[in-house]
Amino acid sequence: MKNTYFLDSMRAQEKWRQEDSINLLPSENSASPQVRALLSSDFGNRYTLPINTEYAGEFLENAYRGTRITTDVEKRAEEVCREVFGSKHACVQPLSGHIAAMIAIVSTTKRGDGLCAIASDKGGYDGYGQAYIPDLLGLRASTLPFDEGVWNLDSDAAAMQIRKQKPRLVILGASLILFPYDMKPVREACADAGSTLVYDGSHVLGLIAGGEFQRPLKEGADLLYGSTHKSFFGPQGGIIATSRKDLDEAVRKNLTWRVVDNVHWNRVAALGQALLEMKRFGPQYAKQVVKNSQRLGRELKERGVPIMFEELGYSRSHQLLMDVKELKAVFGKGVNDFSVMMEKSNLIIDSVGRLGTGEITRLGMKERHLPELADLFVEAAKGKDVRKKARALRNQFDMEYRFR
Ligand SMILES: Cc1ncc(COP(=O)(O)O)c(C=O)c1O
């Protein structure tokens, strides 16, 4: 292998994904140059490990020295996290959304308890299926009633089920999420059943931070957690926010040596920066994301792309959903083959039929740019090579000058 293989790969990746292509994956976003600088900084080489234990007859607050700045960075990141999510407590240690979920679940359940979440075939996160986190933590998983016709939780039926089953934990939130939930009936049922209600905001975290979609902590969730790199445009990682002191204490007990050790301080510093950016222009960004979803949905639908839920305005999130059966009827390809073909034109989408507007909004696209994007999409969907046009459109936008 050439000594420069990995550096060459980096350049090829940067050119492809930052210059030549347009990203419509709802699970991804682009971090600012400042966030990227922090990710490659000295913080990424360091430890700080507050252990607060006796060792050789002395009290050890921290296992390491040289931690003065790093320790402060964590405190400041937590501070701005509390401000952005309006919570009394915040934790920036989870290395990802999945790890945040593990910490939240292990802090609110014990072995043998029941957990209820949205089914993965209704867009719920696969990790809550019996074979995954529940199996690992000795929990019994069940699913919440869901109305596919409006792609939403059936809140009243869910409330009835919660009162009957009395699960220890109810998780709202999903990987395919278009519309906010009516949380009131669920919150009331959880109060009656003695269940803890948590919200996995992995996908919609950037919208929640900007005051769009819904405000889970205000609407009754005991705890909010999620990934920081989907609609939230930070570094890859996770956060947990709660206003309940007992839950915060339980979370803290499950950090060092249980679910995490070194938490990658370059990520924490970068997350702090992304949170500051969110504080400054989060509302403007989040509003634009939703407007862009709705407009892109309309423009694509008018051009024959089978975007679902026109009657509901397509979406209230950063996601749109294509009807995959119709897609095959219209363009002659199953959704996986369709996504492979789109990639050849440097339009990056997933292989389940979701389209995402987080990254294009982060780059600065507004409603007026979306007819052109929809034209490109349809040309590519018909098998034309639109790489040049995609690059030209992409290069009208430069993160350096947007949302700063
Ligand atoms: C709803 C939901 N929760 C949790 C996760 C896991 O997040 P991460 O990939 O950051 O570990 C995902 C990932 O796609 C998700 O969609």
Image: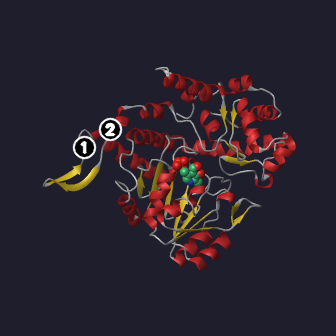
Res 90 → quadrant? bottom left
Q: How many marks?
A: 2
> For this rendering, which residue is in front, 44 or 204?
44
On the image, which quarter does residue 41 sit in?
top left
On residue 111, which mark appears?
none
Which three-letter amino acid code belongs to the residue tagged 1?
Tyr
Q: Is residue 273 left or right of residue 388?
A: left
Rendering coords of residue 265 (x, y %)? 38, 41
- How packed mark 2 is, by other alpha carbons closer than 10 Å (few <14, some 14-19, many 20 or more), is some
Q: Position of residue 383 (x, y in %)?
A: 81, 31
For the residues labelled 2 and 1, the Cα–Cα distance comes to: 9 Å
Residue 118 picture quarter: bottom right
Outermost residue on the front side: it is 1
Q: Nearer the viewer, residue 399 or 15?
A: 15
Element under label 2?
loop
Label 2 sits on residue: 46
* Near-viewer residue (239 or 13): 13
Q: Is mark 2 in CB contact (under 8 Å) with mark 1?
A: yes
Q: Indicate which disc, 2 or 1, sits on the residue closer to the N terminus.
A: 2
Q: Is mark 2 within 8 Å of ligand 1?
A: no
Residue to which mark 1 is pinned: 64
Q: Amino acid at mark 2?
A: Arg
Q: Residue at x 76, y 39 (%)?
A: 338
Q: Is residue 365 left or right of residue 208?
A: right
Above-or-below relation of 305 to 82: above
Residue located 26% across and 41% down the image: 68
Judge whether residue 217 can be spotted in this image: no
Question: Going 45% across and 47% down the picture, which residue do you hit?
Answer: 95
Q: Residue at x 23, y 51 (%)?
A: 61
